Image (cartoon, rainbow, N blue to C red):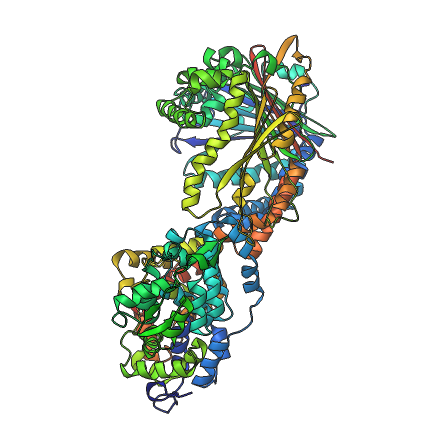
Amino acid sequence: MRIEHARQRAMILAIMCGLGSATAVPCQTEAPQRVIACLESSGGVFALDAMADSILALLADIENFTPLFERRTEARLEFVRGLVASHARAPWRPLVESLLSRSVRLWIVERGPMRRTAVVLAADLDDDREADRHATTLKKLFRIETARRASTLVFDSDGYEDAASRPLPPRRTWSVDEAACVHFAIDFEGSRLGARLARRAAPGASTVGAALAFAGMPRAIVASRGIEGALMNDADGIRLRLVVADAWRNLDAASKRLFEASDRDSRRGPLQLLPGDVLAVRSSRNLGAFVADHSSYCLDGVRAAIQRGLSRLELLFRNQDLEKDVLPFLGSVFEARLRARESKKDQPHVGVLPAWSLSARVLHERLRYVFDSVLQIAAAIAREPRERQGRAVVRVEARVRDDIHRSRWVADVHHGLPVPIEFQFFPAYARTGEFVCFGNIVEDCVARVARSAGDHEQSETTAGKPRVTIDSLRFSGRVAAAALADARELIVLQLWLHRLPDEDAERVASAIEKLVARLGHIAIDVDHVGDDLEVVLCRMIER
Amino acid sequence: MTAAGWMRRFEPTRSRPFDLAARVHVLRRAVFAHPTSWLRATQNASPSEVAAWLVNGEAPDSRERRVLARRDAILALDDVDATAAWLWSRLLTAQHPLRARMMLFWHDHFATAISKVRSCAWMVEQFDVFERFGLGSFRDLLERVSSGPAMLRWLDAESNRRGNANENFARELFELFTLGRGNYSEEDVREAARAFTGWRILRGRGHFDERLHDHGPKRVLGRDDIERGHDVLNLICGSQQHARFIAERLLRTFVGPDHPEGAIDDLARVYRDADGRIDRTLEVLLASEVVHDPRARNTRVRSPAAFAIWILRTLGLEVAPVPLHRAVARMGQELLEPPDVSGWAGEEAWLSSATWLARVRFATDLGRAADPLFPTPPLGRCIRGHGPERELDALIDLLFPEATTMGERVNLLARAVGEVRGSRDVRLAGTFTSLVLLPRAHRF
């Protein structure tokens, strides 16, 4: 769906930032223009529905968070809000709402080798005076921001009429997601932005976490034509779909091996939050391939760190060679969960923290027994320093019930003293069939994972191409807020100890709970569909 | 109670009145700080009434109760910095400031370090003992501290067993806690160590185990009727030398290192007459001639704790406890971590080039009202008056209220390079920093 604009009512504002000097070439030069990013919004209910209970509400609530800000940040926010309100002669919130409720078009234009990026904004407004007022306010804000950054700013509408009226090339997502209220696209091909991102992505991952999470994906993304996106909203919430065309095809072979799940693992049903879950993450990573191939997408320092990590871990695995004897026999799909848990009345906890679990499939039967001893060895390693520090010594308690092998760390607490917080993180291990689970909620975790593995679903297809999920995340703001409320005393304590006076700490803790509850139900999926990479982000309203 | 000689009650005269400067002096010596509310509470009071007010204290207010209520949560964190920081907030919110002051005093006296004790809960328990018994009978305090898990671990009491006595505790008991060097023999140490055999830590508490105790005959300080540790404590606490030892310690703290020699015997007599009760001894001392002697003023170097408490309580500033704990540790006084069993050296040793820089940083951080100590500008809230001169006046009124004469104020004004430009916050920060970094701000 393309948006038809009433030209006479459109406000067009061109902003050029960061010129070399104030005497640089004026905008009216004939330097070629290139639109590198564009956004078209049909306006209306989108902005209000999508933002009203989140970003706008957060802005309205900002004073509850001010104790966390530095004074300068707080002062700037207040200044901007005041400036907007005074120029628009209206409270800032209705103003922002009214602006966002219109049709809005935005281009980012690169123009000539000497010039930096220009932003062109067009919005349909009812009368010219209103348009002028908004333009003045925006210009002022940008002028202040540019002055703060000590760069130069040129406003010029005329030089960009052409860019604003030029039709953009047809996009794939725009045809697929016709009902979307916002479409946008960012081009990398041949643009300075693409070149700059390519230079940053070229060296490879700089941390172990980044290597495991993204491998060669950043390089593949910036080598693609660009990113397209569509934002849809309905009564249940909003959905953002990003497509990176050809990113999967551009991905190097080593990275593909890391992300590819084995056949048995790839057929699992979609990830779902269970009652009481704050967060669930499922990732497809072939750790055997990671250890073997990581050098093709990592910096040297990361390679050394991985080798150090492996040699430390080998101690837990009875000095087995992780690279040869353990990792190749692990399944390639890992599931982690964070769950709120109820406090037990007989235990003098000062706050209840969410429990965690990490589960995976172990393909080789012999390895399952190796995992049995990991907790024992970890307890033995932890015992000596704990004993030296006068802390409760941990031991491992093991039992088998309903075909589930379970072992856990236990420690005796001195009578009458509160249970140390660290006890809430003490790990346990459970195994049933070919599934293992580490964490502190292993009782039902391993059985559930084993059950859900049997619920195979037909793999989804899009336009005839199979959809393969690499990463999935589900988050419940409502449950997270309840979990934060359970741990409120600890949050307030930490804020008070390190930063804030008592009353402010209480206020900030309440504001954090409220903010998290507002996040709603969030789902993120990273898939590859044919040669493309797709990221889908949904935010559902929790009722 | 006999209060003669240097311990006779200070009677103000026209030439030596009990004026604002005298009250400020006694408050600084006793509890480090002199907020306006305390000066108001002691207005028109006699020296004895001020001493009684200090010894009796007040009931906890809501802020102090809130801090105390966090005990379990702090213990659950089991973190040294958090524990020390929480103890700091106890010291700073205590409505019985002399009791809080004595917690610090006994922490220095029975210097126990967490680096060896390795248990935040045991250190907190020891501080609780200091708070509860620190103004009571020294004999009771000594027995509680000696049988607490922190002291048992600190001086290796757990390895003090029949047939293999460990003398660490007995030696420090004589030398540092009760009698002083030269007032006992090596034989006394060995025999006393045997009397203390059998103590160990069981389920986080001090526990006496008959089976590990040496039941043989012992001879300590010339007495043969010693069986167990508490017999040794009774013997020591009843001795004249012990009274002199405690008297000397109290005089060094509340009068200064150059206290008159004769004052020791006078205070020792008071201490014995008070049955070894610290509160009754201090009530006499704080109203006595020796404390109010003008020559005693400004003779002590402010410890980092005294410096921080003076500023924070006097100005009514609230700071985040962990950054405060770290700042005071940088100045050389790390709570829960005294340098050795004899405590902090004190006095001139507090001021080295490194610790002076830490004091400058502390003052600057407080003044500029920025992270890590302050999220909001507290100085602006507690200082009245606008304009450079009024702000400087207001700060002097709070920090140096004894500077009442024009000459003294001019002297302070000349030395404090007050900021005259910038916003009120900037001016206050500059003036505050230059005032608290004056040499006289580091003596009391």
Residue A499 x %, y %: 49, 51
Residue B284 x %, y %: 41, 83
> Residue A324's image quarter?
top left
Q: Is residue A278 left or right of residue B145?
A: right
Residue A462 x %, y %: 65, 12
Q: Is residue B21 visible?
A: yes
Vertical relation: B70 (above or below) A94:
below
Vertical relation: B53 (above or below) A289:
below
Quarter of the image containing the C terminus of chain A? top right
> Residue A461's image quarter?
top right
Residue at the extreme top of the image, as rendered: A464
Q: In this view, does B294 lie to the left or right of A32?
A: left
Q: How many marks?
A: 0
Quarter of the image containing the N terminus of chain A? top right
Vertical relation: A496 (above or below) A356:
below
Closer to the camera in the image, A156 or B351:
B351
Closer to the camera in the image, A416 or A252:
A416
Closer to the camera in the image, A157 or A243:
A243
Residue at the extreme bottom of the image, as rendered: B14
* Residue at x 43%, y 81% (from the top left corner): B274
Residue A251 x %, y %: 49, 13
Q: Can residue B431 be seen in this view?
A: no
